[in-house]
Image (spheres, grey):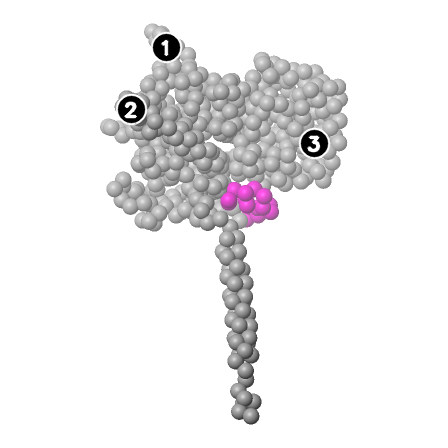
């Protein structure tokens, strides 16, 4: 009878084992779930090496409200960061957008003859750079201005250690080259070509050639160049004829160019170099309300008609289009009142032709963007600024040269584009025009900052090349030591 008051020992064991199994299973399932959740994304990526995510959200976002765009702000330049001070961000002098990758740039202190002295600026004492707190050197107007990126980028670096009231800086000048992502060469090569490419007696070489020779000698002697073979150096040569002599010796560097028209592919290519916009010459169309019906001219072109090389198409198109009543196709120059006339013409036209000239690119594209005149691009070899993040087909019409030269093909194509399609492109032009505006101080996602961001996207590839080049450094050291 006493056995009935106590459960059998086997029953107790079975219940314990069941509880233990249930608990263990629950713990295992929970642990497995937690492991999957924790490994949902890689944690070993250095996000500072990735392209700036903000550029994608800006370009693909909804149209910007003009009322949300802040007017240019002039920074308080009264405080500079000393080389011995802690990092500018820590001191509160540089307020950077945390979503933006700030490019760290070391800039050579080249003598003034390579940069601002070409603008007739005179250095005081041993100063290399102008004091931007007191006066910003003036850049000459006219056609010289279209290749002035060297001026705007240098100003931006010089002022990058001033307090940043916008919090939108894309590049920061560092004073130690080993901390830099890239090395900047402040040679105003386009201005040097425009102003000093002709010899003046008793010269045996032009000043432009002499400066290029000095630049090659200087750069190849620097520790920074030897360390990377020049791969991490940025050299500006925006005018197609600038740096003609030095480019063959400095080709490992990253060039900032307008196109590749006068470069062999082993010297310059889209893999290593950056295409930058021209600075538009005509006036920006402020408060543009000239919609489809207000723009009376269907297709507009004013410029040099008879060109060499790829520019032969201009004269062919002139003969094909000159009799069309709603097309304006005329010879014109920037001299006299030419720029004002071009501004009026583009502002009152629906479509503006951008035709290849001596090289694939032309300032006319950027004049059209500033005018909100839908560009019609006829240039098979053209490369465009920021095209890795910006879809030009949303606001440009591309026509192959072979098609454009067919009788009536181009004019019929343009006339087939209706009001609704044109209006969408016109609205898009107004949304993206700030990407092509050069200004000082630079503003968020203007041309200066967009160029720096384009350079940033090249940095991981540069680092990969440099890292690969060091693979057999110990072997080479052993050979030198006779091992």
Neighbour class for label 3 at 10 Å: few (<14), some, many (≥20)? some
* Image spot of residue 123 (x, y percent): 29, 27
The residue sitting at 56% across, 27% down in the picture is: 383
Image point 36% across, 19% down: which residue?
A: 216
Report how far apart the C-alphas of labels 3 and 1 lie in the structure.
51 Å
Q: CA distance from mark 1 to mark 2?
A: 48 Å
Q: Residue at x 37, y 18 (%)?
A: 212
- State the mark number for residue 65: none
Residue that mark 1 sits on: 205
Q: Quadrant of the C terminus?
A: top left
- Left or right side of 452 for 319: right
**Magenta segment:** 53-67
Q: Is residue 455 left or right of residue 177?
A: right
The quadrant of the image that shows the N terminus is: bottom right
Residue 475 lies in quadrant: top left
Q: Which numbered tag is attached to residue 483?
A: 2
Q: Position of residue 340 (x, y in %)?
A: 56, 27
Relative vertical location of residue 70 with respect to residue 359 in this rendering, above or below: below
Pointer 3: what residue?
Answer: 296
- Can residue 64 be seen here? The reply is yes
- Circle nearer the N terminus (3, 1): 1
In the displayed structure, would residue 3 be above or below residue 14?
A: below
């Amino acid at each position: 009878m006493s056995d009935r008051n106590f459960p059998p020992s086997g029953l107790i064991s079975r219940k314990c084992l069941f509880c233990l199994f249930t608990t263990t299973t629950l713990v295992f399932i929970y642990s497995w779930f937690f492991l999957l959740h924790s490994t949902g994304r890689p944690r070993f990526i250095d996000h500072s090496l990735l392209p700036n995510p903000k550029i994608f959200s800006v370009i693909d976002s909804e149209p910007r409200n003009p009322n949300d765009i802040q007017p240019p702000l002039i920074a308080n330049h009264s405080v500079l960061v000393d080389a011995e001070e802690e990092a500018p961000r820590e001191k509160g002098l540089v307020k950077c957008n945390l979503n933006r990758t700030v490019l760290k740039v070391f800039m050579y202190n080249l003598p003034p003859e390579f940069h601002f002295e070409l603008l007739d600026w005179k250095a005081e004492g041993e100063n290399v750079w102008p004091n931007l707190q007191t006066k910003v050197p003036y850049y000459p107007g006219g056609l010289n201005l279209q290749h002035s990126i060297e001026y705007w980028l240098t100003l931006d670096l010089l002022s990058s250690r001033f307090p940043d009231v916008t919090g939108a800086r894309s590049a920061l000048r560092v004073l130690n080259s080993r901390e830099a992502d890239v090395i900047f060469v402040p040679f105003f090569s386009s201005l040097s070509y425009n102003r000093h490419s002709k010899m003046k007696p008793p010269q045996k070489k032009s000043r432009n050639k002499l400066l290029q020779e000095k630049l090659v000698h200087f750069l190849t002697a620097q520790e920074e160049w030897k360390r990377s073979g020049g791969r991490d150096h940025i050299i500006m040569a925006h005018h197609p004829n600038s740096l003609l002599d030095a480019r063959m010796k400095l080709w490992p560097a990253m060039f900032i160019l307008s196109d590749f028209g006068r470069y062999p592919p082993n010297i310059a290519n889209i893999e290593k170099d950056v295409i930058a916009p021209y600075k538009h010459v005509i006036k920006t169309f402020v408060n543009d309300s000239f919609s489809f019906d207000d723009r009376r001219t269907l297709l507009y072109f004013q410029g040099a008609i008879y060109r060499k090389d790829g520019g032969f198409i201009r004269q062919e198109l002139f003969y094909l289009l000159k009799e069309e009543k709603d097309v304006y196709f005329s010879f014109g120059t920037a001299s006299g009142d030419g720029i004002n006339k071009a501004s009026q013409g583009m502002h009152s036209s629906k479509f503006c032709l951008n035709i290849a000239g001596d090289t694939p690119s032309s300032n006319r594209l950027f004049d059209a963007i500033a005018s909100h005149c839908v560009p019609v691009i006829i240039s098979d070899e053209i490369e465009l600024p920021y095209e890795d993040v910006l879809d030009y087909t949303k606001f440009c019409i591309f026509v192959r040269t072979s098609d454009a030269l067919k009788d009536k093909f181009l004019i019929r194509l343009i006339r087939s584009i209706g009001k609704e399609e044109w209006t969408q492109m016109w609205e898009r032009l107004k949304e993206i025009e700030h990407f092509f505006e050069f200004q000082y101080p630079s503003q968020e996602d203007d041309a200066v900052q967009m160029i720096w961001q384009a350079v940033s996207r090249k940095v991981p590839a540069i680092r990969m090349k440099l890292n690969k080049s060091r693979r057999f450094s110990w072997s080479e050291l052993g050979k030198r030591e006779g091992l």
